[in-house]
Structures are given as structure tokens and as C-alpha cells.
Image (tube, grey):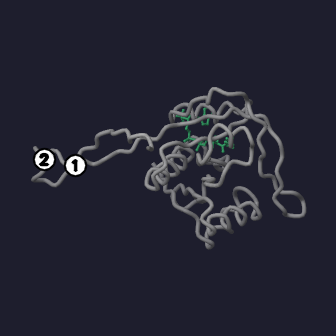
Amino acid sequence: MTERSVRPATSADLESFAKVLRDRAFFDDRHKRQLNKDGVLFLGWLGSRPAGVVYLWMEEAEEQPIRDHLPHVPLIMNLEVHKDLRRNGVGTALVREAERHLLAKGHYRVALAVRTDNHDAARLYDDLGYRDWGHDKVTCLAAVTSPDGTVVSEKEVCHVLVKDLVPITPVPRTEVDADRRFTAVLTRPSPPA
Ligand SMILES: CC(C)(COP(=O)(O)OP(=O)(O)OC[C@H]1O[C@@H](n2cnc3c(N)ncnc32)[C@H](O)[C@@H]1OP(=O)(O)O)[C@@H](O)C(=O)NCCC(=O)NCCS
């Protein structure tokens, strides 16, 4: 099986991804936000082929209902895998890497919005443990590039899904200590004071 890899974008990656996925203005916009520490642009490869992208939005949500119900909760956005490379686990790997990044930064909750008619993506998110947030659908703003190259926002109706992230803490297992091997146990963080 061809190996998947995911890492944050560098400026050297942008051109090759813009050739096969979204347009250059999108990548420039998200990369600029990453440089401002407002989010992280994760890129995924299948072997050496640029395969997919996801952006982790760490700013407050642009949509008021999401800001109201999920203040300070990071958002997974702009998940996309090249159409010829789908069903190879790249989408899943991108979301998981974004989740790992959040846990490492001390975030225990993440959210996203998925169009009400996007059943393929909804299934992926369901498999990964994302659940409906229990409030109304939201009119979201999708980043679309206009003919002059500027990124503009377009409205679409979405379900909002949330996931509580659980850190995996390595704990030494006495019987294998001599081997310096570790087993993973699940721990749930204490809620913030
Ligand atoms: C949604 C998307 C990112 C999935 O990427 P991917 O690399 O194919 O995802 P994975 O290979 O990790 O698939 C994971 C799971 O998602 C679900 N899934 C993905 N594509 C599917 C499809 N076409 N039909 C049904 N289920 C699908 C399945 O549960 C799949 O698991 P399985 O292959 O074991 O059945 C990709 O289809 C895509 O780019 N779609 C267009 C953009 C989009 O809709 N983005 C989401 C915006 S919210």
C-alpha cells in the first residue's frame, strides 16, 4: 500500500498543491494565516503525490451561532482530497493529524461544519467520532475563489459536528519495563477550573 504522510505546509509546498487541488489564492490565504499563528494548513501526500489538504482554523468562528455555542473551539475546515486519490485514508489521516496537533496544544474539543447534502464527508466524520452539536443547522461561509483570484465567502447550509478529544498518555507497563516499551491508556482531562 502506498504510504500516507501529513505535515504542516511550507511555502515550498504551495505551488504543487495548488496545481492539483484548490487554487493558489486559497493556499496563500491559509498559509498566511498559519504564519500569523491563526491556524495550521496540513497537507497530505500519498507516496510522493500531493493528495489532500485540511485547514485547522484557530480563530473565532466567522458564523455567529458557532461563536455563541462553541467559543474558542478550533474548527476543522477545507478538507479535500484529490478526486483520483480518495478512499485511500488520506482524508482520515488529515483529520487525525489536526486532532493530534490540537491535543498537543491543550485543546480538548474540536468542531466542524459539513454541508447537509455532503453524505460522504458526513460518514467519514461519523466514523471518526464527530457528533451533531444539538443546535440548529447553520448557514456557513465557504471560501471560494473569484475569477480575479481573490478568496470570497459563499453561503451554504451545514450541520455542525463536535468531538471531544481524548489524550493518549504513554504509561510504562511493569512487565515490559526492561524492554523500555510502553502501552497506551486513555485518560480524560479534568475540565478547566
Ligand atoms: C470527504 C473526503 C475528504 C474524504 O477523503 P478520503 O481520502 O476519500 O477519505 P478516507 O479514504 O479517509 O475515507 C474515510 C471514510 O470516509 C467515508 N467516505 C469517504 N468517501 C466516501 C464515499 N465516496 N462514499 C461513501 N463513504 C465515503 C467512508 O466511511 C470511508 O471509510 P472506508 O473507505 O473505510 O469506507 C473526499 O471525498 C473529498 O475530498 N470530498 C470533496 C470535498 C469534501 O466534501 N470535503 C468535506 C468538506 S466538510
Q: Are marks 2 and 1 in contact (CB under 8 Å)?
A: yes
Percent position (x, y) of residue 166?
A: 41, 40
- Residue 74 or residue 146, whichever sits in front: 74
- Is the residue at mark 1 in contact range of ligand 1, meaning its CB lies under 8 Å from it? no
Distance from Cα at disc 2 to Cα at disc 1: 7 Å
- For the point 55% across and 34% down, the residue is 130
Give the secondary structure at mark 1. Answer: strand
Percent position (x, y) of residue 137?
A: 73, 30
In the picture of the structure, the residue carrying the numbered disc 1 is 182
Percent position (x, y) of residue 159?
A: 69, 32
171 lies left or right of 2 = left
- Residue 102 or residue 29, whichever sits in front: 102
- For the point 44% across and 44% down, the residue is 193
- For the point 66% across and 65% down, the residue is 31
In the picture of the structure, the residue carrying the numbered disc 2 is 176
Q: Quadrant of residue 37?
A: bottom right
Q: Tell me the kind of residue under disc 2.
A: Val
